[in-house]
Image (cartoon, rainbow, N blue to C red):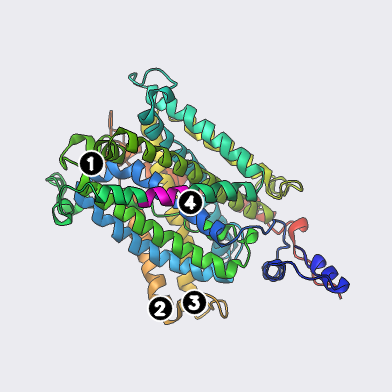
Amino acid sequence: MSAGDGGRAEETGAPERPGQGEAHRDDEALGLLGYRPGLRRTLGTFHTFAAGISYISILTGTFQLFYFGVAFGGPAYWWSWPLVFAGQLAVALCFCELAARYPVAGSVYNWAKTMGGPHTGWLGGWMMLTATMVTLAAVALAYQLTLPQIDDWFQFAGDGGGPSDAAANAVLLGSALIAFSTLVNAFGVRLMARINSAGVFIELIAAVALIVLLAASVTRGPAEALTDTQGLGGEHSLGYFGAFLTASLASAYVMYGFDTASSLGEESLDPSRNAPRAILRALVASFLLGGLILLFALMAVPDGAAKELAAGGLQFVVLETLGATVGEVVLWCVVVAITVCVLAVHAAGIRLMFAMARDNNLPAGSRLARVSVRFGTPVAPAVVIGVVGICVLVLNVNQPQIFSVITSIAIIMIYLAYLLVTVPMLIQRLRGGWRPAEGAFSLGRFGLPVNALAVVWGIAMSLNLAWPRAEVYNATGEQHWYLRWGAFLFIGAVAAGGFAYYWFVQRHRTGVLDEHRARPPAR
């Protein structure tokens, strides 16, 4: 709703519709940031919560990465779950303060820009945008881990026994999912939000049901399950701690993306209040549900030393413990979770690309920032991100190892993008320049230590993720130095190449596009 509409309502004496006044105030807050409202405010409290929790997507992440944690850390890798949660909670609390003060699309980009200046903002946005497009493809690959286990009919490429059958089929299934996500996101945020909310509702019910079913099938106590290292760590100079650091990546790969709840701020009602709540609720709910699923799965599996744990992952536990019929129902719920996760990742990427394009910070900015009159959403970013995601998927056909390297690197880039927000924010605090929004979410006197913890955590986990481990970056085949050091090389190339383009070309064009610039109030 525009300011002009509000004026006409007052002049005619027409009663304000529910939510109309809130939307008007939210649009005024957006104007203070220099933007005129261009997206439709239609999302309620549950929609924003659903966006955050579906990006994290507990059923997707736990089912996709359980095997990795067990393979490198044994069942005791579970302790990485609360560890990662504690670090990410510090980041999320900083984001809550920012979301309350700056409820704007493309949150990480705009927060980095506001806290650290335009150059930091562009680099943060570029890193996040690149990582989002790769993450979209990585999440879509999870179809291959689940659908063929439900029914062999879903193995369209070969019979699954060939050396490249799984990779080729993953591309087919993933491409179909990304195409679906592109269409849904292009048709407007309300359609995406409805499908996403319904999917999240199913995912939450399935997660609770899975916890209950696994808890009813336990065969060992938590003390036995959570102290089982399976003798891993002997080859590490740091012993089991080295193995645990590697296994902790399974948790680090899951617990991020909670900022999506704030990235939809320009399409949400009362985002200054609802976005911080949605961020925290999404992260805490994901921690509790995911932690209990992992705990009871490790306690319920008949043989804690079974090799299938590190091969078939959580899918194996569910089918082995709950039986084929119940197991397949759960796996169908996982398919729903993967679908809404892709929708949320795609939606977040669209808002980020739109936000950067609105500032003329991307090539063809005016086209990418154009909002469809019919659908009320930026259609071009939906298509561009979808096409790039499918192109990234194609890399998996004959080069699955390189794809796994790029996927790992994408997660690091998201952690680095978060650092490009929390570090400038910490500097602002130390200089006395940070002020939370009045009457909104605030950390008070805990702001400085929490912010400092978020920075230390972000740096430590980024180094842990990027460490040149053969088991992560060169797990199979001939050893290549460029794969082992892929994180540093790829991220360095993306950051340096992208920033060079920005510095020499794009920064000279930067500025809010006229059609998106806030207009001074009429007198």
Quote the CA–CA distance across marks 3 and 1.
41 Å
Residue 101 position (above or below residue 384):
below
Q: Earlier in the sequence, mark 4 or mark 3?
A: 4
The x and y percentages for residue 23 are 69, 66
Picture quadrant of residue 383: top right
Residue underneath mark 4:
201
- At 51% across and 67% down in the image, what residue appears? 276
Q: Is residue 391 visible?
A: no
Picture quadrant of residue 519: bottom right
Residue underneath mark 1:
71
Residue 184 among magenta residues? no
Q: Earlier in the sequence, mark 2 or mark 4?
A: 4
For marks 2 and 4, give the one nearer the viewer.
4
Residue at disc 2, secondary structure: helix
Residue at disc 3, secondary structure: loop
Label for residue 446?
2
The x and y percentages for residue 126 are 54, 51
For marks 4 and 1, give the one nearer the viewer.
4
Residue at disc 4, secondary structure: helix
Q: Nearer the viewer, residue 477 or 78?
A: 78
The x and y percentages for residue 94 are 46, 69
Residue at disc 1, secondary structure: helix
Magenta range is 201-208
Label for residue 442?
3
Is 481 positioned to the left or the right of 336 in the image?
left
Quote the CA–CA distance across marks 4 and 1.
31 Å
For marks 4 and 3, give the one nearer the viewer.
4
Q: Disc 1, disc 2: CB below 8 Å?
A: no
Q: Residues within 10 Å of mark 2 (few under 14, many from 20)?
A: few
Say what amino acid the circle numbered 4 marks. Answer: Phe
Say what amino acid the circle numbered 2 marks. Answer: Phe
The x and y percentages for residue 167 are 40, 27
